[in-house]
Amino acid sequence: CHVSSQYPHEIYQWCDLITHFASQAGLSPDLVAAIIYQESGGNPEAYSKSGAVGLMQVMPRDGIAKQFQCINGPCFSNRPTIDELRNPEFNIQYGTQMLRRLEDHTGDIREALRSYGPMDVGYYYADKVLGIYQTHKQ
């Protein structure tokens, strides 16, 4: 396990999955743990008011998120379902891959986190996650 023991049990219980999928995506396990801490507090059943699901609060293609419309149709039509995202293993795998793609696209983890988080908060979300990361990392 490569997640800092500074994280509470609710996060640390997912240590093996976090370590595996963060390492696979070339991300810091402590950074992924910080996202889970911020997003769901470690609750795999978490469901936000905007419709995001699971440990890493990924927007699914169904549920409330189905109503979000982008220029070419539903915004999240290529995303997994709510049921898929409630599976902790699937959620962490999908969330880490999504963050990896965002970092590859932006070239910067802070920019990637800004894109990962809520669209209407600027850098607040990114800085919050990075703060959690700095406080808890090994």
Image (cartoon, grey):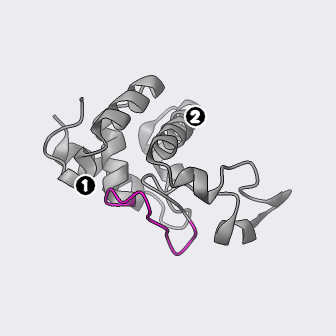
The image position of residue 26, as x and y in percent, is 43, 24
The image position of residue 137, as x and y in percent, is 19, 39
Q: Which kind of residue does numbered mark 2 sit on?
A: Arg
Magenta stretch holds residue 44: yes
- The stretch in magenta equals 40-51
The image position of residue 117, as x and y in percent, is 49, 56
The C terminus lies in quadrant: top left
| Residue at horizontal 52 percent and vertical 75 percent from the top | 49
Q: Which kind of residue does numbered mark 1 sit on?
A: Glu
Magenta stretch holds residue 118: no
Disc 1 crowd, CA 10 A, few/some/many (<14, 14-19, 20+): some
| Residue at horizontal 43 percent and vertical 38 percent from the top | 109
Magenta-drawn stretch, dominant element (helix, strand or loop): loop
Residue 16 placement, left or right of 45: left
Q: Please give the residue where the numbered disc 1 appears in the rendered image.
A: 10
| Residue at horizontal 74 percent and vertical 48 percent from the top | 78
Query: Which secondary structure, mark 2?
Result: helix
